[in-house]
């Protein structure tokens, strides 16, 4: 049995995962045996938009075939209001909030502006940036909680390093820098930081960059930071969080250039809850409140999507005509929102559903 747990991960037994263990490779990898595939009854259905994000209740935000930003919730597609005068060429990184607002980026000819739809039918509000960051901003909002609170990264131009920020308060007008002054075991001054997301309780995750190292971190609701626990002597080697949910943080880690890659699960206090060895792991793109992971791996001939839950690894193949699936989120039931990507790079929306919802996974704090 592979060593799967660092710290404690208590899993409620699920029929698909009982008594199984994850594969340590991907199909086509000559270094490992072909993995045992666990089919859990996923069926694919087409979506009326190409999703870019999914919340716990299954609502999705994305782009319609006509290029409009939209929210798809409860079987209803709502086109979001836009304001032509704000110069948005396209909208990207769209994420539905827990209350079905939408947060994302407005890409303009002068840079990227963080935006939030407080009311879906209205044009989005542009979030404030630090004084001096308004000329050629490059900002992204990457996570959101209930109400008007979110985190993201902003920079002042092509020669200015990014800084992680938290927006909060009425209208999300209060801007707080999350960048620490020093980090690590020595005097190691931080010169840049980035935030990748935040859960409904206000815990945010991201990276802090110094002249010596890159540190994966979690920020508490009060903005105190903790370095995420790593694996082995190369604790921070290519380690980055990618998703934050109510009870955990998910991400990717390479313990060293020689020993491969791991999908990671951290508790909100920064301790390591679980890790899944996977050869040629490319990304961890989704995490449910029950502990289901989703992402993609590189098989040698292209990408292949996967999902992991309760010790079982399932490979997710694309519908006819697509080269691979790109997961973008997992809801609390275990449904996976994905993009079906063709060899030419075009994408359409796909929802992967199953007959029974996932049972609860408890992460020890």
Image (spheres, grey):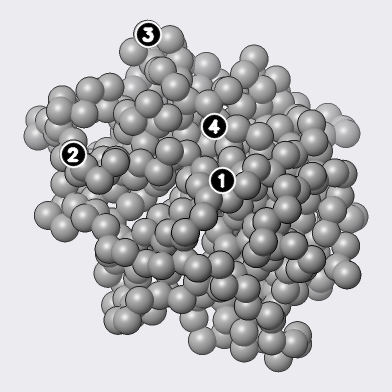
Label 2: which residue? 78
User: In the drawing, what numbered circle is on residue 288?
Assistant: 1
Label 3: which residue? 170
Q: Secondary structure at mark 4?
A: strand
Looking at the picture, how far across and down is residue 110, in whole percent? 25, 39
Quote the CA–CA distance across marks 2 and 1. Answer: 24 Å
Q: Which quadrant of the rendered structure holds the N terminus?
A: bottom right
Quote the CA–CA distance across marks 2 and 4. Answer: 24 Å
Q: Earlier in the sequence, mark 2 or mark 1?
A: 2
Q: Nearer the viewer, mark 1 or mark 4?
A: 1
Quote the CA–CA distance across marks 2 and 3. Answer: 25 Å
Label 4: which residue? 198
Q: Secondary structure at mark 3?
A: helix
User: In the drawing, what numbered circle is on residue 207?
Assistant: none
Looking at the picture, how far across and down is residue 139, in whole percent? 40, 35
What residue is drawn where x is 58% and y is 63%? 307
Left or right, 48 with reference to 27: left
């Amino acid at each position: 049995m592979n060593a799967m747990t660092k710290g404690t991960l208590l899993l409620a037994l699920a029929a698909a995962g009982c008594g199984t263990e994850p594969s340590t490779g991907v199909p086509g990898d000559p270094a490992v045996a072909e993995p045992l595939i666990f089919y859990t009854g996923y069926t694919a259905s087409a979506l009326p938009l190409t999703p870019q994000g999914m919340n716990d209740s299954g609502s999705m935000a994305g782009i319609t075939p006509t290029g409009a930003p939209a929210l798809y919730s409860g079987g209803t597609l709502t086109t979001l209001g836009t304001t032509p005068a704000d110069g948005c060429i396209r909208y990207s990184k769209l994420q539905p909030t827990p209350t079905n607002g939408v947060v994302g980026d407005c890409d303009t000819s002068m840079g990227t502006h963080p935006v939030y739809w407080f009311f879906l039918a209205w044009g989005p509000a542009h979030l404030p940036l630090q004084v001096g960051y308004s000329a050629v901003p490059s900002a992204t909002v990457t996570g959101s909680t209930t109400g008007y609170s979110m985190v993201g990264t902003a920079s002042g131009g092509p020669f200015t390093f990014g800084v992680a920020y938290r927006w909060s308060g009425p209208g999300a007008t209060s801007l707080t820098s999350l960048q620490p002054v020093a980090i690590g075991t020595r005097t190691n001054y931080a010169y840049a930081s980035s935030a990748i997301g935040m859960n409904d309780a206000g815990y945010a995750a991201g990276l802090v960059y110094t002249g010596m190292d890159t540190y994966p971190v979690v920020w508490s609701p009060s903005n105190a930071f903790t370095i995420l626990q790593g694996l082995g002597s190369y604790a921070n080697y290519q380690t980055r969080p990618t998703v934050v949910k109510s009870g955990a943080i998910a991400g990717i880690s390479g313990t060293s250039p020689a020993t491969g890659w791991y999908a990671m699960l951290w508790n909100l206090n920064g301790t390591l809850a679980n890790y899944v060895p996977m050869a040629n792991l490319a990304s961890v793109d989704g995490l449910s409140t029950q502990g289901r992971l989703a992402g993609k791996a590189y098989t040698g001939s292209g990408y292949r999507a996967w999902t992991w839950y309760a010790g079982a690894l399932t490979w997710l193949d694309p519908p006819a005509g697509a080269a691979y699936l790109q997961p973008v989120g997992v809801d609390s039931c275990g449904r996976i929102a994905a993009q079906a990507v063709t060899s030419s790079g075009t994408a359409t929306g796909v929802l992967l559903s199953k007959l029974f919802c996932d049972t609860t996974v408890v992460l020890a704090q």
